[in-house]
Image (spheres, rainbow, N blue to C red):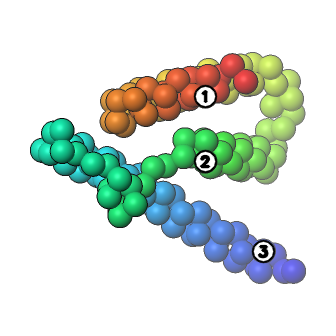
Amino acid sequence: MTPKQINDLKKEHNAMQEQGQDLYAKVMDLHDKCLDLQGRIQEAEGTDYDPIPLIFGAGFRLDPDLCQAAEADRIANESKHIIKRADEAKLTPVMEMFQSELEHFAELVAAAEREECAKLCEAYVAPGIGKEMATAIRARGGK
């Protein structure tokens, strides 16, 4: 394969990755809207509320484990991309000298990001599910 062909494949890959991120954002938005509508319907119907038609008719839930796996893949790909760029910039010797400091810094950044994600789950996802998701996100730091 020529360098141009490889570069074209990389561009195609990046474009598809961006499309996937946009699609993921749209799915998350739809998910939030569906949960909001279900809550409003339940509030309006009171004791007559029956979630079964919503579940089988139009409802959906996002599997937190699936979301976490997708996010882990995204982070791993970003890490590989950053390391490759550091290699291209001839920073590998610097990275090797400060390996433990860089790893500690990366852990701090990841912990802060997990906490922000957990707070978003608690604030914007249905109460019981949001709390469970937040707990699962925070627990990932212990792995």
- State the quadrant of the C terminus: top right
**Compared with residue 132, is residue 21 higher up or lower down, i.e. above or below?**
below
Dot 3 alpha-carbon crowd within 10 angstroms: few under 14, some 14 to 19, many 20 or more: few
Please state the horizontal and vertical placement of residue 1, each as a whole percent of the image.
87, 80
Q: Nearer the viewer, residue 77 or 100?
A: 77
Residue corresponding to mark 2: 66
The residue at 18%/38% (across/down) is 47
Residue drawn at the location 12% of the way across and 44% of the way down: 44
Which image quarter: residue 76?
Answer: top right
User: Nearer the observer, disc 3 or disc 1?
Assistant: 1
Q: Indicate the position of residue 81 as horizontal and vertical percent values.
A: 71, 50
Q: Which of pointers 3 and 2 lies earlier in the amino acid sequence?
A: 3
- In 3D space, how far apart are the residues under numbered discs 3 and 2 (Cα atoms)? 31 Å
**Mark 1: amino acid:** Ala
Report the side of 7 relative to 45 (left or right). right
Q: Quadrant of residue 5?
A: bottom right
Of all residues, the one furthest to the left in this rendering is 44
For badge 3, the amino acid type reads Ile
Measured as percent of width and height from the top left, residue 124 is found at 33, 36
- Mark 2: give few (<14), some (14-19) or many (20+) Cα within 10 Å: few
**Residue 6: mark in rendering:** 3
Q: Earlier in the sequence, mark 3 or mark 1?
A: 3
Tell me which residue sits at (40%, 60%) in the image: 56
Point out the frontmost of discs 2 and 1. 2
Instruction: Tell me the residue that label 1 is attached to.
Output: 110
